[in-house]
Amino acid sequence: MGSLQHLLSRPISVPFSPNLNHRRSFFAHACLNLDVHAPDSVKPKTHLKSREVMEMEGKVLVGTYARNPVVISSGKGCKLYDPEGREYLDCTSGIAVNALGHGDPDWVKAVVEQANLLTHVSNVFYSVPQVELARRLVACSFADRVFFSNSGTEANEAAIKFARKYQRFTNPDAKQQVTEFISFSNSFHGRTMGALALTSKENYRFPFEPVMPGVNFLEYGNVQAATELIKSGRIAAVFVEPIQGEGGIYSATKEFLQSLRSACDDAGSLLVFDEVQCGLGRTGYLWAHEAYGVVPDIMTLAKPLAGGLPIGAALVSEKVAAAIKYGDHGSTFAGGPLVCNAAIAVLDKISKPDFLASVSKKGEYFKELLMHKLGGNSHVREVRGLGLIIGIELDVSASPLVDACRDSGLLILTAGKGNVVRLVPPLIISEQELERAVDIMVECLPALDKTN
């Protein structure tokens, strides 16, 4: 299994906290220069070494990704392995995708069984897994209907089209059609031209302008500005993330979302919740908006829904669905039998009350650990989030910490303006693995002083 080259073996006692299971003691497993190797059951089958894969990538792929210098070749649970068999604790979940971790047996069974029956048939025909997944999504949400896509950005593109069609459908004789949108600071809704237009970071949009016109960016959480603009009667829909992921793990307030709901109802605008990253159990609620008691007209989903296979969905109320007719939108691959059967397996597990309760419990424990063990560091400004979507805001770039953690066997992400550590581990992660993650981050904190 390899060696641990700087094992911290002394027990650490955490002071009393109701979220830390009283005076819980544990052993820190964090270390710099970690050298842990994959068990035989998940050893990669490739003969290529990491260096060879990275060199080959540089010759054949378009350079759109600033990749970490790690090749991932296999995984199990919350662990990932490179071609040399080195182990990494995964707190990225493929950017909040692998909610059930890697190689979940029920997910694998669903994929294999469906692959042996039917993989793709297109939306020219009906297929059982698609209808069954839609039925289950409707049953456990506010929605009456579902439109499937292949990704989160496509789900948001569908929501854009549905919102504009809804306004034309409900106001067919209007001299001036209602076509504008509201989005917010620190928002991220995707990289296709419509969703990109709703994304706040100028550096994402600028190289590709002109993008879709008619988008108004307001300060996230500014009730007065949003209410006044919605009342103007020009807004087809308001797009908002209940918890912003890419933007830096910022949570909306109940007052803000309630004010959007009320203003949209008064003006005839639609309220769209983008839960691509924060939805489907990530917050400890099945849907993030449940924490606020506010219901949207459209909700977009994607990342964790099929456990690693590409899927997106726009869940809509009946009033929105009534505006959509044959030919208004479509996709060749969306909602195929294979991906939908995988999604059914994911939804069945995540929607169970005891599973969601475990996410809440682990999220509280994780935040408490982080605040206790990292909160005293001079670079740490705030630890925030809900459930297992957590951000650590720093007063410097987070990249040196991310790099040092990777070298020590922990994979984490950045967010915001690069100064936020984003933690979105698989929802199945254990408390022991959370402890290990925190201890590695503590050991790696000096990297912030060295580099910045």
Image: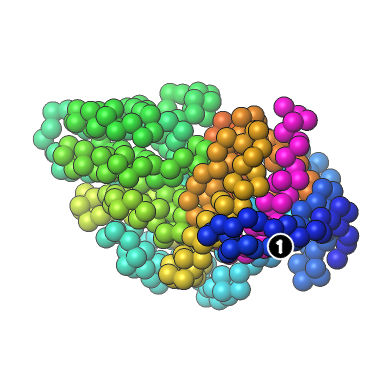
225 sits left or right of 443 in the view: left
Does the magenta stretch mainly form a helix, a strand or a loop?
Answer: helix
36 sits left or right of 177 in the view: right
Give the crowd class for mark 1: few <14, some 14-19, many >=20 residues within 10 Å. Answer: some
Residue 139, horizontal then vertical, whole percent: 32, 67
Residue 420, horizontal then vertical, whole percent: 59, 37
Residue drawn at x 52%, y 60% as measured from the top left: 18
Picture quarter with the N terminus: bottom right
For residue 365, what is the image quadrant?
A: bottom right
For residue 263, what is the image quadrant?
A: top left
SS class of the residue under badge 1? strand
**Does residue 64 appear anywhere in the picture?**
no
396 sits left or right of 184 in the view: right
Magenta segment? 425-452
Pick whichever, 130 or 51, lies toward us: 51
Pick whichever, 7 or 291, lies toward us: 7
Picture quarter with the C terminus: top right
Q: Which residue is mark 1?
A: 26
